[in-house]
Amino acid sequence: MPNPPVTFPALFTPANAVAFTNVDGTAQTVSAAAPLPVAISGGVGTQAISAASLPLPTGAATSTNQTAINASLTTISGQLPAALGQKTMAQSLPVVLASDAAALGVTVANFPATQAVSASALPLPTGAATSANQTATNASLATISGQLPASLGTKVAAASLSIGVASDLANLEPAAAAITGTTMPTGGTGITGWLSAIYRSCSEAATVSGSVTSATTVVSVSNNLYMGGSFHVTSAGTTCTITYEQSNDGTNWVTLPVIAASAASSAPATTSTTAGVFAYVSSAAFVRARVSTYTSGTVSVVLSQKQQVAPVSGISLAGGAGAIGSVTVSGTATVSGTVNPGTGFTDSTTALAASASFTGTGRANSAAQLEFFSATAFADQAGTLFIEQSLDTGATYQPILSQAVAANGAANLTVRMCGAVGAATLYRVRYVNGATLQTVFRLSSGFSAS
């Protein structure tokens, strides 16, 4: 029930007090030693609320846990880059916090209604999380958020976290090892350098150029994977001599024969004094062009290497009367008429009746240089083409090759001649028509050397 107002004499300072009724009916003033008894809504009996006596809800944060969380967040913040963009090393940990709260309703024993306990009036239990700790947590999370990309997806370099390859991996692929005895060509670096060197080696042709104004090497390259190429002297200088050389160790050089590609007939040479294209074939590991005698001017050479080349290490007979060694013929050699002649025949152009046949003339291979006998047939009706041979001067013939001919189609047969060359060995064509009368028929044969 409400407490009655207390009136003090004028000499005393007015004061207000809250009291409650003890079990024995006496009045008890509220103090730290005698707190106001309250009843928890939904609970049993009346309990005194104090920082020491109010238990924390299950799973509530404590100051000990809050300190550990702050330490973990400080560690995470130290593991992230200070800002977005390319860095030497970076790792990220996304953090999402969610919180909620609910009011706790209490009923005071001698008050007429249930009163809500507010955060400002109710002291926190010992070890509870505080707003100061929460502020530190928010500051750490804000730092982490600023170090992460604003959204997922591809980003430019300045808005990305960089990734560093582990320092204990010598190559991108585990357990990788480079071969020995191979060095990267001049100018190459890293993976890009090796890839460009591989491309150069696998390409059909590689071109290298150089210019000098003294007695020194103009161009010098590796010849591995190449079979030859050509030196194009675009400027020969004035009274200068270029020497062409090859080597397997890149130190000891020997001469390299070249052929003037622009000449109709030329012999191999090891030097040149004029502009032009000089082709070569070499299986050596290295080739080069060197100015062996220098007078004045600029000597410029463009070298093109090829994986497949034509043989150029002999004498060219392209348009002249070059000599290739010597040929000795004993006895008498007489050549007359046409070399490797061919003889052809039109056997028939007369249409055949239904189921009729045509037999050609038996012919001998009178020239030893002829090697083949061929026959060709065309008809507007289906039939069969035969080539027949006789080894007894035409007394008997045997079919040695045949082919069906479709209506409005053709057939072409060729046999290699065998047997003794002479009048006893004969060849002929034979054609058998089908069950329909022809209106168009063509049949021919002949001997040939190839």
Image: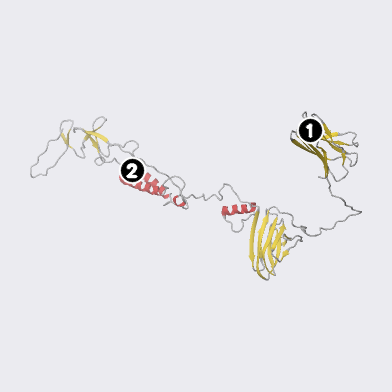
Question: Please, is residue 364 above or below residue 112 in the view?
Answer: below
Query: Label 2's element?
Result: helix
Q: The C terminus appears in which quarter of the rendering?
A: top right
Q: Position of residue 207 (x, y in %)?
A: 64, 57
Q: Position of residue 310 (x, y in %)?
A: 73, 54
The one nearer the camera, 369 or 235, is 369
At label 2, the amino acid type is Ser
Query: Label 1's element?
Result: strand
Q: Position of residue 449 (x, y in %)?
A: 82, 45
The one nearer the camera, 427 or 172, is 427
Task: Please identify the quarter of the rendering in which residue 152 is found.
Answer: top left
Give the label on residue 108, or none.
none
Give the label on residue 63, or none.
2
Residue at 44% x, 46% y: name it: 92
Is residue 397 visible in the rendered structure shown here?
yes
Name the N-terminal-most of marks 2 and 1: 2
Residue at 50% x, 50% y: name it: 164
